[in-house]
Image: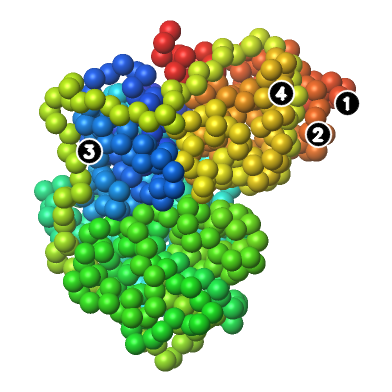
Amino acid sequence: MGMTLIAKILKAHLVEGTLETGKEIGIRIDQTLTQDATGTMAYLEFESLGLDRMQNELAVSYVDHNTVQVGFENADDHEYLRTIAAKKGVIFSRPGNGICHQVHLERFGKPGKTLLGSDSHTPTDGGLGCIAIGAGGLDVALAMAGRPFHLVTPKVIEIRLSGKLRPWCTAKDVVLTVLERFTVKGNVNCAFEYTGEGVRSLDVPSRSTICNMGAECGVTTSIFPSDEVTRKFLKAQGREADWSEQRADGDAVYDGLFEIDLSKVDPKAACPHSPGNIRNISELSGLPVNQVLIGSCTNSSYTDLVKVAQVLDGHTVAPNVELGIAPGSREVLEMISKDGSLAKLVQSGARILESACGFCIGNHQSPGTNAVSLRTSNRNFEGRSGTKSAQVYLVSPETAALAAIYGKVVDPLKEQSVKAPSAEMPEQYAADDGMLIFPPEDGSKVEVQRGPNIGAPPEGEPLPRTLKGEVAIKVGDKITTDHIMPAGPRLKFRSNIPVYANYVFEHVDPTFAARCLSNKAQGIPSVIVAGLSYGQGSSREHAAICPMYLGVKAVIARSIERIHQANLCNFGIVPLTFQNEEDYQAVSQGDQIEIADLYDGVKNGKVALKDLSNGRTIILDCVTTAEQKEMLFAGGMLNLLKK
């Protein structure tokens, strides 16, 4: 029986366990990446391991999130990241060099390798034929230390592509088609592998766009084969030596199949307030638009922006529209400045934004009250833009550019006055590593700079035999890590857990943190109760660290997403799920609860919760790996490592 490409790469990196679907394995991680919003804590955690240098093949620290420097905090974080990178043997990508996923694709990603990143959109590099996985910062720190990364061997879903995209139809529309089919929940411990003759028609940036938004489905990773298209891309980047062919066996057996005829893909949008709320653009035609933002790690490549420039050429942005465009990297910005595309963007009235994450994470460019904002990014959770009342739609760059001209959503397939754009991959990219700082061979004399906002990671407490506490909050379905830990103006506190913890659930229940701290002072553990798909979205481990600091001991949900569950275990918070989903309705905020045999329940995978407020007993599952159990017993991974 033949092997899938994912199975082949996992097997080549297997160091623990048996490669069998549903079984826990440990794999060797070749490359790691961090970004500054998660990186400061990741490197603080790496320092706590006591190693002089990183132990994996390649580690890169990017600054791309907290680049709006209001106050000293972000600048201090950047200086810490620069100096700790030099000391520990890590490459440092300076602010302005670009978004981590775009730059890593251009300069470092390699077919057949494994990449672990402290950002949920790390699977972007699956477009090169490597296994790229998003994780919490602590998992990345451990991978940098040479420790295996543990995961459940995923089911591999084949997404078979045929045909070729029509003009105005894009890779963004392909992945929105995938989201329409698989939605944003229910895909834990699955992976997507793209196959079929249609793959050859997609360039590497298009493949990466598709892999990027696989994260919204909650899958472990997405991957394309590495073929002649991949080789040409790496050659154009001056990295042909990094190429290798990577493909599945012809008789590979998959766990599922979804077929897409690219010639039948229509322009689509993810409507408010979920990447899984998909509609065809034709259904939205005529919707007035107030803001258009083009960029993010999903759609900020050179070919993306060349096409946008072609659409905007000779036009002026509609009077009611604000247009902002953020090139994904300095390389992209340099290339569009040389070929004339940048001039077309500027002449149209576009505001050229920094090569950074910026608007995607709500760090600037918040829309107006009740505004409609079309964005080429990957998430449109309520309030993520910085404006809770805004209506954010996710679309392709081409659809976004048309809306900027007309001031409303326009169906590209019916648009006759603007010629459909096209762009070929260049024979040579403007590869320039001048904004990368490579570490010295000996970092022992480097002095690490620590600003007053930077503190050590907090430590958890060993798992109690009995948990008797209070349901501090009850929330519904699809609670994202944005809901748990707000980004935007709060990002600058990520290095200071006691301060950042005050904002847990800020936009859901602003009194949550104070209630938990009051409980903590009285020795009363707090518990979170949630619905389906709790912890979807960003990989931010602060959504576990800060609740831990507040005294949260358990999360009880109808379902929990993969990365967030791993982060909860990393920091000693027990992930529990309702065995019977209707029991979710029986628990209320403020209820006093007791789990008399928590330790044994975690060990055996099943616990009995007694709701002391209503006398009801509820059976809960605790589905964790062997390593996660050990972490929970110890009160978190950092405690476990000190044993």
Q: Amino acid at mark 3?
A: Ile
Q: Amino acid at mark 1?
A: Asn
Q: What is the C-alpha distance between the residues marked 3 and 2?
A: 49 Å
Q: Earlier in the sequence, mark 1 or mark 2?
A: 2
Q: Are marks 3 and 2 in contact (CB under 8 Å)?
A: no
- Front residue of 429/607: it is 429
How has the structure been colored for display?
A: rainbow
Q: Secondary structure at mark 3?
A: strand
Q: Earlier in the sequence, mark 3 or mark 4?
A: 3
Label number found at residue 588: 2
Q: Earlier in the sequence, mark 1 or mark 3?
A: 3
Label number found at residue 614: 1
**Quarter of the N terminus within the rendering:** top left
Q: What is the C-alpha distance between the residues marked 1 and 3?
A: 56 Å
Q: Nearer the viewer, mark 3 or mark 4?
A: 4
Q: List the residue tagged with mark 3.
A: 91
Instruction: Identify the residue at horizontal 23%, vertical 77% (top origin).
Output: 340
Q: Earlier in the sequence, mark 2 or mark 4?
A: 4
**Quarter of the C terminus within the rendering:** top left
Write down the quadrant of residue 632 in the picture. top right
Q: Nearer the viewer, mark 2 or mark 4?
A: 4
Instruction: Identify the residue at horizontal 33%, vertical 22% (top origin).
Output: 47
Q: Is residue 412 visible?
A: no
Q: Are marks 1 and 2 in contact (CB under 8 Å)?
A: yes
Q: Residues within 10 Å of mark 3 (few under 14, many from 20)?
A: many
- Front residue of 200/293: it is 293
Label number found at residue 518: 4
Q: Nearer the viewer, mark 1 or mark 3?
A: 3
Position in image of residue 228 (x %, y %): 19, 59
Q: Amino acid at mark 4?
A: Ser
Q: What is the C-alpha distance between the residues marked 3 and 4?
A: 43 Å
Q: Is residue 543 above or below residue 202?
A: above
